[in-house]
Amino acid sequence: MRDTTKHQGLRNQLATVLQAKGITDEKVLMAVRKIPRHLFMDSSFEAHAYQDKAFPIAAEQTISQPYTVAFQTETLEVLPGDKVLEIGTGSGYQTAVLLEMNAEVYSIERQHELFKKTSLFLPKLGYKPKKLIFGDGYKGLADEAPFDKIIVTAGAPFVPKMLLGQLKIGGRMLIPVGKSTQIMTLFIRKSAKEFEKHELGNFRFVPMLEKKN
Ligand code: SAH
């Protein structure tokens, strides 16, 4: 697959749609205009790549809806140089958006097929995360903690304590919490023991699973 001026036009339209839905962060909109989302998907979905919808990728997983990716990125308030932990690498699209924010990205994926595919794919587009890890996101990444920001891109049945513990003081963690639908929940770490919690509306994600296949 190639990236053409037609794709560029569709990306510009998608950014306009996201703006109409309330996304205001210009850096996030720039990332949407820049990243060739169709290349992150199976070629049979190419015609739909710039609709504001989630689509199947491999291993029964999905590439998140562009609005969701934009909303999560904007809400995290990613600053250049931030150390960001992502749970659920999936297609790598959200990873690419975080890299466009000039973050240092660590991302964990539990499906080996996706981990392998995305590890090979991202560098081809020039995207270089600090680390892509095949493992269990519930455990986070103790060796690299603490993180400025943590973003969970699968629906978590509960808030994993280990992830909260890996957040810097002043850091933000965004996680969709719930079983069939999820409430997007923002935690801001105020001190070693205190977290501020904000609930930011309903979303629908594939589940964050506990054991590896
Ligand atoms: N950010 C991705 C979203 C993919 S969907 C994208 O934009 O493409 C969620 C991903 O989370 C899936 O790839 C799924 O395999 C992964 N996932 C589910 N449970 C996980 C866990 N415990 N640890 C790490 N990844 C997990």
Image (cartoon, rainbow, N blue to C red):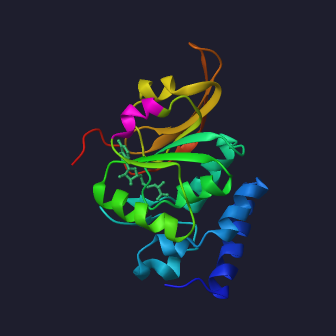
Q: Residue at x 62, y 68 (%)?
A: 35
On the image, which quarter does residue 83 sit in?
A: top right
Instruction: State the predominant SS element of the stretch in magenta.
Output: helix
The magenta segment is: 136-143
> Foreground: 40 or 201?
40
Give the left or right position of residue 81, taking residue 143 as reference: right
Outermost residue to the left: 213
Residue at x 63%, y 49% (from the top left corner): 73
The spot of residue 156 in percent (x, y) is: 41, 38
Residue in front for this viewpoint, 149 or 202:
149
Asked if residue 21 shows in the view, the reply is no
Q: Can you say whether 77 is above or below 39 in the image?
A: above
In the image, residue 141 lies in the stretch drawn in magenta: yes
| Residue drawn at the location 42% of the way across and 43% of the way down | 155
Q: Position of residue 210 (x, y in %)?
A: 29, 38
Is residue 68 shown to the viewer in this render? yes
